[in-house]
Image: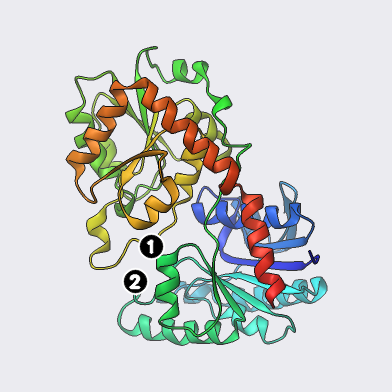
Amino acid sequence: MNRFNVAYLAFDQFVPSKHAGFVHSYSIAKAIKSIGNDVVLYGIPAGVDLYNLTRWSGEYQGLNVNYVRFIVSFKSKYKPLYPLNIISYYKTLKNLQDQDPDIIHERFHLPNPFSAKLYERLDCPKVLEINNLYVGCGVYVGRDEKKALEQQKKHFDQSDAIITQTRTLKDMIGQVIDKPIYVVPNGVDTKKFDPSHSSEELRKELGLEEDRIVVTFLGSFRKWHGAQFISKMADLLKDKKVVFLLIGGGELFDEIDRGRRENMILTGPMEYDAVPRYLASSDILIAPFDIDYFGDRDFWWNPVKLFEYMASGKPVVSYDLFEIRQIVRDAGLLAEAGKIEDFIKNIDCLVEDENLRRRLGARGREIALKEYDWEKRARDVVKVYQTL
């Protein structure tokens, strides 16, 4: 296998961040490095470093990072900050020229005119990683959609190959681009997410009695994640010894917190390194996606949390959608799409059957170890590099 010098461009991601996009970018970049390649991650500095314009490089948990500070938005309120783009452009160009990569691996996002301009100054193949098409998915409309289409075309024209997460998204991309498209799903750090991290001490910290069944939701409190349905689940299972643990934050957090039931615990946003202990200390892990949110569009996401759930050795409850079924397989119970009553029945089934919980959880762990570790995903990505 060839050794590659890779510039991984994640211009829309803070380093570090609780966002799933950062988890994916950092995890796959680090895994590509771990199998014998040189990798530099390009992302936005988090915290006070964002304002330190003398700091354009650093290191995060064993991975070299070059920082960018591009203001990427169609909103006019950000125009006063645009001069920062000029500084960031020349600093990033110098970092890329100093690195002299064999491969540009770019996490696609819109708006983003800068990586396309930078790439014109480089001489190496470009792999575009598309996790969301943006245009045609309801993100941009009207004048903004026209601008996004222009930028999208430039990114697509420059690319030598496309990596995407799901077969459904591959089909969508194939309708608008004539380039080789490879499917490399998300993955999980199977050492970080491990059933052995289960903690009775943590359950005591949460005020949980020994016989409580902990049903955990992890994710962003945005509409499509479905956290807004958990209050109804808590109502219908209030006579059971069940506690719903909700980990995360977002635009719906305050509304859900105001409607919190007695058998619900909301932790708020949490540092990513703390999450594995909570999942391993739970009994059932849920992903109640809001099917209505997608309208006529197929569910094309490849949620990182489903891989983390399975690696944690716990049974998964979600909906029977094609892409979810490809991940969960026989390691959980999948309700009829959009039928919350069916979803609740599946939770109840697992609450009543400890042996089934153990069996499904063990199966999920087995699949994650064999197929879902980030190192395996990295090898699949490097195979794409080798085709160029």
Residue at point 39%, 74% (across, down) = 172
Instruction: Identify residue for label 2.
Output: 137
Q: Nearer the viewer, residue 286 or 117?
A: 286
Per the image, label 2 sits on a secondary structure element best described as loop
Query: Where residue 335 sits in the image (x, y, percent)?
Result: 26, 44
Q: Is residue 148 above or below residue 230?
A: below
> From the viewer's perspective, is 126 left or right of 112?
right
For residue 358, above or below residue 40: above
State the residue in front, 81 or 266.
266
Q: In the image, residue 195 lies at what x, y percent?
A: 54, 28
Q: Nearer the viewer, mark 2 or mark 1?
A: 1
- The mark found on residue 300 in the picture is 1
Q: Give the camera-side residue of 248 and 25.
A: 25
> What scheme was used to colour the molecule?
rainbow
Label 1: which secondary element = loop
- Disc 2 marks a residue whose amino acid type is Cys
